[in-house]
Image (tube, coloured by chain):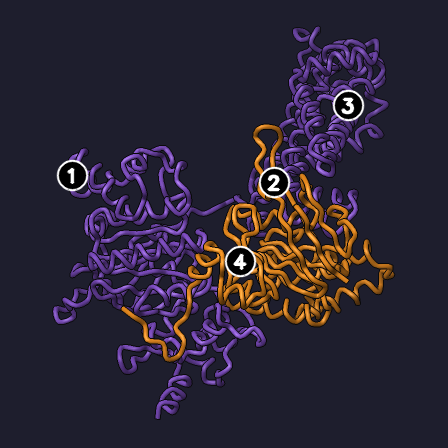
Amino acid sequence: MSNRSRRAALTGPLGVASLILVAAFVVLAVVAPPLWGERADLVDPGAMNQGPGPGHPLGTDNLGRDILARALVATRLSLAMALVATLAGAVAGTALGVLPTAFGPRVRRWFAAVIDVWLAFPVLLLAMFVAIMLGTGTTASVIALALTMVPSFARLAQTLSASVGGSEYLAAAKVLGIPRHRQLLRYVLPNIAEPLILNTTISVGGGLLALSSLSFLGIGVKAPDYDWGRMLGEGLSAIYTTPTAALAPAVMIVLAGVAFSMLGETLAKAVRGDAGSTAPRRAVRERPAPLAAEERDDDVLLDVAGLRVTFPGGVTPVREVTFRVRPGEIVGIVGESGSGKSVTALAVAGLLPASAAVHADRLTFDGHDLRGRTEAELRGLLGTRLGFVPQDPMTSLNPALRVGRQLAEVVEHHSGTPRASAWRLAVERLAGVRIADPERRAAQFPHEYSGGMRQRALIAMAQMERPKLIIADEPTTALDVTVQRHVLRLIAEASREHGTAAIVVSHDIALLAGLCTRLLVMYSGRIVEEIDVAALPRAAHPYTRALLGALPDLDTDRSLPLTTIPGRPPTPAEFGAGCAFAPRCGLAAPECEDDDPPLLTLDGGRRLACPRAHKETVHGNA
Amino acid sequence: MGTLEIRGLTVRYGRGRSAVTVLHGIDLDVPDGGVLGLVGESGSGKSTVARAVAGLVRPAAGSIRLDGVEVRGAADRRVQMVFQDPYASLNPRMAVGESIEEVLAVHTPLARRDRAAEAARLLDLVRLPAQVAGRHPGDLSGGMRQRVAIARALAARPEMLVADEITSALDASVQAAVLNLLRDIRRELGLSMLFISHNLAVVRYVSDDVAVLNLGRVVETGPADALVGSPRHPYTRELVDAVPRLPAPGDHLAG
């Protein structure tokens, strides 16, 4: 949440109105009693129950006292009672909700039970009961109201602190031996304070109403003190003769209640930071230039040139990416977080959100230009020819549908295959990814599958129609290493047995080296090197070399430190004019900061975006 | 000193009939100044070992002794832990320096003004500039946060450091820097370490000895190179085979 959106919430019409109102009430509470206190208490037997007139703008009550003055003076007591009661309730409730965090599970269960029972009592009834028990009066009604507020604050604090209680930083604090009171004051409270403060502000409005109700019913403030509730109660009897006697306090109660609730809502909005949120503008799809006939190539399945993805706000995570995939070939895209590798894969699969603007000089798959297509056209084109394997197998299957049904739907939808034969095909494909007992498994729901089985089911799903290309985005990141190997083997098998090409995205260069024939190394949204896996030991780009040296494998020399890269990669918002890797590069020269080096093609289809490394390779080979 | 002896460690989660045993009486040893690597897959119980040694989980049976003295729950200064997620293990509301000084206040006799200097020294030990002390975790990258977490653990002057998957949330190049740092710290401070990871290559690189954990039982232990070079247990063999390897210079890839 940004400061700008916080400010926007507070300076919006609602925010300004509530701030002004609350400020006015506070000022009134301070200045009204000294200014008009005497006048409000002045009994004038000669002017009882008068209507509005020159001496009394809102008339007088049954003892001839000025109604306006009384309504204004009552502000102090009404607000003070509401504030004190709410604060007391908030402090006691928070303590009750937070304290158990520092103790064991048994104490926590006891506290939870107490809060549950307490919450079950109706608020106003409890307040009335307590007020009467305590003998009515100002103090009694404040205590009564505070007691009714305790459980809701306790419940809120309990829920919030439970999430902090399960946090690693609190576990860390325990291991570090931070004393319990400090754990509460510095770790738990600051991290739950915002919602509690908001709830307090909102509760002041409610508390004001509840206290007024008590006074109205005659079990709150006692004469000679008076608050709005008592004024309302007494004024009501004369509603037909002097309506202002009841109306004036009623208006004050409503205004104050609304003001505090509004302020609470505004603060809440400011904290959430969602004020004035602008809906993402839908990007305009660019009109593609017609495809030149000679650029068609039967030996190329996927042809991407000059791919550029821009997100709303002008962030460009993928810049001028050009590559080709031949039928049956497995290409790896490797890079670290923020390199644009996943965005590239998603852009090719047509799966980026609509707010992303995708531009490409060429984006051809299986002879079809994918640019400028509508969603429906794209689905029709890619649906049967391209399979996508997502990163997280846990969230990528519909939990409410049997796995076999989900697989069958793919072919039913795209090729109109009848239900029964689609199901048979689903079972066959599950068997193909080595899921034992596929008939039984197909009839099961995703939650009955392990993580590895779900990912295999997703690979089976991607292969339902024998696609020409499978795009897998970090397909094994969420899996154990032994399961990972099986999953990768399935992709390799599909390639070998059915000629399916694949693009596999990963941060793990060793993993890709074991699976792919060719690697695209991405850094800061660009391809910096394209290299055959067999040539990896002779990788030229300083970044590729650093990646290789940074990763320990089972043969790494344990007596030497690993290669590290100083600094950190730039975020897409920081991409500058020069080579993005230059600030971290050992080979960098001043000119590297000026121009982004082009991706030059070398012998054997190898490509490299580093003229200095290129010079070295040439000299090294000579 | 820091000789860790785990004997018959059994941990159960839940109560009564629904209780699940995640560790079945395991034995582990970390010699003084040594690094024991603990490798296993999800559900093997390796994080539970970490939490038990750090005192965050109460064992159902067995003993955890450091230099012959039973580890006294979470508050035992001698054992400190670095957590997996550097985005979750630092209090987001506290400046880095404050986080470290707070630990110094509890565990060292240092006066208030000396604590800042000591915090700067600890930050330097993890190769972070002293200015980082004034920043909040939200302003730092994942790698920097993990260094802060290490510095904070060292502030308690532990004899035993438990590192639970501390690089699995980091990018490869950042991971390398943190692993190098651990090596250096170990050499400089002579700290004993229990290093836990699912990544066998990382464990092998950092540890002297490696223990393989599977379904709550230790299936094999041995010196790192020997265990990886000639695994005996079929599960260890499977783990070793599953580690992706880079082609070495001169390799001829089949297929």
Q: Amino acid at mark 3?
A: Ala
Chain containing the residue with disc 2: A
Q: Secondary structure at mark 3?
A: helix
For the residue labelled by badge 2, is the local secondary structure a helix, a strand or a loop? helix
Farthest residue in the bottom direction?
Answer: A622
The orange one among the chains is B
Cα separation between marks 4 and 2? 48 Å
Between tags 2 and 1, which lies in front? Answer: 1
Q: Callout 1: residue from which chain? A: A
Q: Is residue B169 above or below residue A43?
A: below
The residue to which callout 1 is attached is A417
> Which amino acid type corresponds to the residue marked 4 in the rendered image?
Ser
Mark 2 and mark 1, same subunit?
Answer: yes
Provide residue A279's location: percent of width, then percent of height.
Answer: 42, 46
Q: Which residue is mark 2?
A: A16
Percent x, y for residue A622? 35, 93
- In primary-sequence order, the first of circles 3 and 1 is 3
Tell me, for residue A74, which label it has, or none. Answer: 3
Can residue A357 be seen by looking at this rendering?
Answer: no
**Camera-side residue of A170 and B6:** B6
Q: Mark 4 near mark 2, Cβ–Cβ under 8 Å?
A: no
Residue marked by disc 4 = B168
Q: Say which label, 3 or 2, has the lower sequence index.
A: 2
